[in-house]
Amino acid sequence: MPIKKKPAKKASAKRSVKKPAKNTRRSAAKREKSIAAPAPLSPEGAANHAPIKERIFTRTQWTVLLVLSFIQFFHIVDFMVLMPLNKKFELFFNITTNQFGWLVSSYTLAAFVSGIAGTFFIDRISRKRSMMLAFIGFIAGNLLCAAAPGFKSFLIARVMTGAFGGLLSGISFAIIGDLIEPAKRGRATGILMMSFSVAAVLGVPLGIWFAHNFFLQLPYYLIALGSGAVLVLAYLRMPTMAHHLFGPRQNVVKQIVAVMSDEKHQRLYLLMTCHFIAGFSIIPYIAGFMQKNNGITDAQLPIIYLAGGIATIVTSPIMGYLTDRLGSVKVYTWLSILTILPFILVTYEFTKNFPLLMLFTTLFFIFVSGRMVPAMALLNNTVNPSLRGTFMSLNGSVQQLAMSMGAIAASFMISAPPGQPMRNYFWVGIFGVVFNIAALLIANTFKTK
């Protein structure tokens, strides 16, 4: 009998061992379930347990970016608002289209010279002080533009405004480099670049409207007034930003020589020169041609710039996406080929139908501005990283010089006495196409994506 009882004990023992294991699996499943589906929190508890999002920028950084965006806004409006008022300035000052070309090119020539000169002293004073001084000069230049009684005095005022405006752009990007962490500089630059789009969509059409409905030089008074308010904000809220003064001094001349002696950099500068000559041989005279030759009215002109600005805001991110996906050289090549069509459409008298003319100018704005996206990507991908700062500073001056060269070259080709239709503008379009193709060919010498 005991022999029969022993197996019974073993079986009971086995059953006693298995039972806890089953309970253990059930309890583990319950624990997993309780972890996977926690008890709902009250609204107060949910608020207390919500994850804290990291701020993109500090309050000081946001303030500085706001100030810089306003500065760029007024700078771009000041530069761009003159060109749509081509016809009115010619009548007001009794000048030819060729002389008007000098009003445009004098601004960019002055910006070119000041940009080169600025590389020698801009790093020797605090960022805030350099920005304040340049902004004060910019405001004074706009007041002189507003009060100028004749062509020569207005030309001198444009030279002054362009010189200080050229410094403002370089200082703004230097401040971003000093104040914003490397991982966030792209977003900071994107915020700053939004001011360009806002200037094209809002600032320029408003400037045209004020000039047409009140008096011609009112936009410059308004630019000076708005800039004065931003100057006060900058003085009160911006930090000094003088950390760069305590680092080792770099030899500016040696840096410039190193940049200019690099064969890749030389080709990049040649690319940007052809790129901007192509566009700015046409851009300054579009409004005058549309009004004098195609019958666009003062009321219709702001609509053209508004449509072009909105289209640019929509298409620029698409150009950026395509550049990242397909490569800067390929996208630049295709956009340059497509740009040839609007170059011809806006410089030849095909029609006087306003919707068609607005379509032509909108295509022009889309492709001419769109080319800039892959062009800048190509520059950043190709330039020597150790010389990027000096290269980009000099590149700004090269762009200003190329703009002047394009506007001056076109002024010699165009013939248009005050108040009369423009002649030979079509040949300016052909001139732009030639330089556009030259830029395309230079871009294709680079193997980088």
Image (cartoon, rainbow, N blue to C red):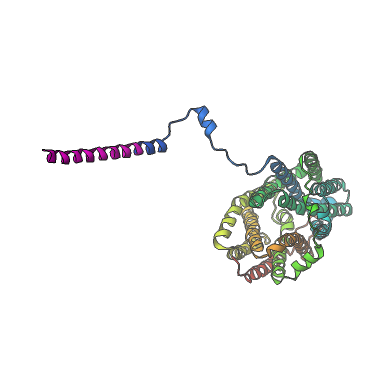
402 lies above or below 306: below
Please state the extent of the stretch shown in magenta in the rendering. Answer: 1-28
User: Does residue 304 appear to the left or right of 91 in the view shown?
Assistant: left
48 lies above or below 216: above
User: Does residue 1 appear to the left or right of 381 in the view shown?
Assistant: left
Question: Residue 276 occupies which quadrant of the picture?
Answer: bottom right
260 lies above or below 200: below
User: Residue 9 in magenta?
Assistant: yes
Q: Position of residue 13 (x, y in %)?
A: 23, 39
Q: Position of residue 135 (x, y in %)?
A: 81, 47
Residue 82 appears in the rendering:
no
Q: Quadrant of the C terminus?
A: bottom right
Question: Residue 215 occupies which quadrant of the picture?
Answer: top right
User: Does residue 36 appear to the left or right of 437 in the view shown?
Assistant: left
Residue occupying image coordinates x 72% and y 70%: 262
Q: Position of residue 395 (x, y in %)?
A: 74, 61
